[in-house]
Amino acid sequence: MKKKILFTLFIFSCGLTSFSAGYLNTKFPLPGKSIADHKTQINTIGYVFSYAARNVRGCNNFRVTDTRVTAGLRNAFRKKGKLTAGMWSEEWIVDACGTTVTVPIDFEINKSRTEFHIK
């Protein structure tokens, strides 16, 4: 019984990963030089598109065309090679119905998660 439940959870999680790979018609990892990991990009993208929508009224077609780090990693700490703390800033460039929108984002990794703040 326990194996059956674990197998079901595994299959379900694979389905979610496949879903996230095409979330909002966006493929991950995003293009450019972002140092945000796959999960953080997925968690951030909806807010980035919302920001773009506020700047380009009436548009519902968004695509990230580039990402770049604007302030490098600072206060970084690694444990067993994995980044466990640090802050950095990026700009994600969004094509919103032919209009370019630059979205400034601050990232911070703390003990349990990576937080992001759109400026």
Image (spheres, rainbow, N blue to C red):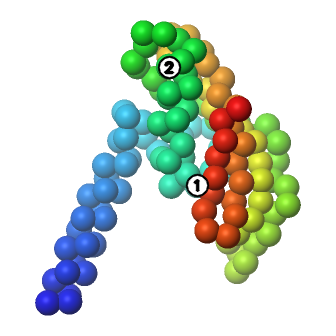
Secondary structure of residue under mark 2 = helix
| Image height of 104 relative to 5, above or below | above
- Give the percent coordinates (x, y) of residue 90: 71, 39
| Image height of 105 relative to 84, above or below | above
Mark nearer the N terminus (2 vs 1): 1
Mark 2 or mark 1, whichever is nearer to me: 2
Q: Which residue is drawn at the image coordinates 38% and 47% (left, top)? A: 21
Q: Which residue is drawn at the image coordinates 31% and 65% (left, top)? A: 13
Horizontal arrangement in the rendering, residue 8 relative to residue 53 (left or right):
left
- Disc 1 designates what residue? 37
- Give the percent coordinates (x, y) of residue 39: 50, 55
Quadrant including the C terminus? top right
- Disc 2 designates what residue? 53
- Give the percent coordinates (x, y) of residue 55: 57, 15
Secondary structure of residue under mark 1 = loop
Q: Is residue 67 something that shows in the picture? A: yes
Q: Quadrant of residue 3?
A: bottom left
Q: Which residue is drawn at the image coordinates 27% and 72% (left, top)? A: 10
The amino acid type of the residue labelled 1 equals: Asp
Distance of label 2 from label 1 (alpha carbons): 24 Å
The amino acid type of the residue labelled 2 equals: Ala
Q: Quadrant of residue 103?
A: top right
Horizontal arrangement in the rendering, residue 91 relative to residue 20 (left or right):
right
Q: Is residue 83 something that shows in the picture? A: no
